[in-house]
Image: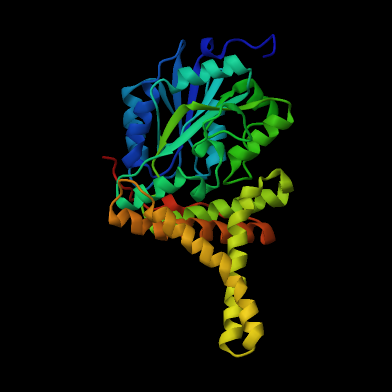
Amino acid sequence: MRENEQDASSAGVSFVMPVLNERAYLEHAVASVLTQQVDGPIELVLALGPSSDGTTELARELAARDPRIRLVDNPEAHIPVGLNAAIRASRYGTIVRVDAHSELAPGYAARALATLARTGSANVGGVMRAEGRTPFQKAVARLYNSPVGLGGGAYHGGSREGEAESAYLGVMRRDVLEEVGLFDESIRRGEDWELNLRIRQAGHRVWFDPELSVTYWPRESWSRLARQFRATGAWRGELVRRYGRRNGLRYFAPPALIGAIALALVVAALQLTGVLRGVAALVASVVYLPLLAYAGLVIAVALAPGRRGIRERLWTMAVLPTMHVAWGLGFLAGVFRGARDTVDASRLKDWNTPLP
């Protein structure tokens, strides 16, 4: 830790949260923030996008009840724009990013502040623990928590504390954020990874602490999930265009699956039309083996031991390939033509599954 850095816990904490169409989740998320206990003042700055489900009205009600809640506008509805607006409007030396679709565990902020001080890091993150209410959402949550679903990033279930490539949400030192220039507003998804890349390039440390836990509620329908993953994949493709191999190898697995599917379809068409016959057709059939192995993996994950109903297991068989295929298609589009104005449209309507 630099000699001129003070203990983050004594300088106050600003929680920042971009919000769009989250009426069913917002009150739970806000409550999980305001019950955090730290040695110093706290505030919660909500960056309000143009919601259509009453979220803005609810946010105003919550702010009227508690002076620690402050509101800023995010008319563009883009996450990094809202985060930067909230950070600029905030007052304290430590910035805690919060998602309206998540809930902080008790003691989260205090533990994160202690880890910041202990490690001298610029940003600390923990584990995203996905939870679900319906059979579909439970299936999605289980895959979020599995390396098979999202590729094994530390914050999806890691158990070893240490330096990290990125941090889920993040508890960050304001002086470092200002040094590197806050979030890049030209990036619509993956903005946290890109910010952490700049933090590390500036000589600071990003730290993973598995004792930090955040509950995350995934999308509530198949179509919303597919739209979310396509947009996320497109922006990862854009990040590959910009930063190349600084992106981890795991990001290239879904597009490899798309390549295997495309090759298998071409071979199947050639076999069905008689262009490939006899020994040539038999040899070409080897392209089906990776897809058969993948199908076996999907079935194995769905049928793995555990207390899950038949509907959740069936949804798992649909959700896992949806996540990979939608992400892979988005990735390839992002690599070859750029993400451009691709946005996550999965929360642009006014319906969310209520929490239990």
| Rendered position, 118 above or below 238 | above
257 relative to 30 in the view: left or right: right
Image colouring? rainbow
Whether residue 223 is visible: no
Q: Is residue 344 above or below residue 265?
A: above
- Whether residue 119 sits left or right of residue 312 in the image: it is right
Residue 247 in the image: state x and y as whole percent. 67, 45
Query: In terms of depth relative to the viewer, which is nearer, 256 or 189?
Result: 256
Residue 154, how many percent across, how many down?
55, 36
Q: Position of residue 58 (x, y in %)?
A: 32, 36
Q: Residue at x 45, y 18 (%)?
A: 42
Residue at the limit of the structure toward the left, as seen here: 356
Q: Nearer the viewer, residue 159 or 248?
A: 159
268 sits left or right of 215 in the view:
right
In the rendered image, the quadrant that contains the N terminus is top right
Residue 163 sits in which quadrant? top right
Q: How many marks?
A: 0
Q: Is residue 198 visible?
A: yes
Residue at 61 percent of width and 57 percent of height: 331
- Front residue of 273/167: it is 273
**In the picture, which quadrant includes the C terminus?**
top left
Indicate the position of residue 292 as horizontal and vertical percent values: 52, 67
- Which residue of the protein is positioned furthest toward the bottom in this rendering? 274
Q: In the rendered image, which quarter is residue 319 located in?
A: bottom left
**306 vs 189, nearest the viewer:** 306
Q: Residue at x 57, y 19 (%)?
A: 116
Q: Residue at x 62, y 49 (%)?
A: 250
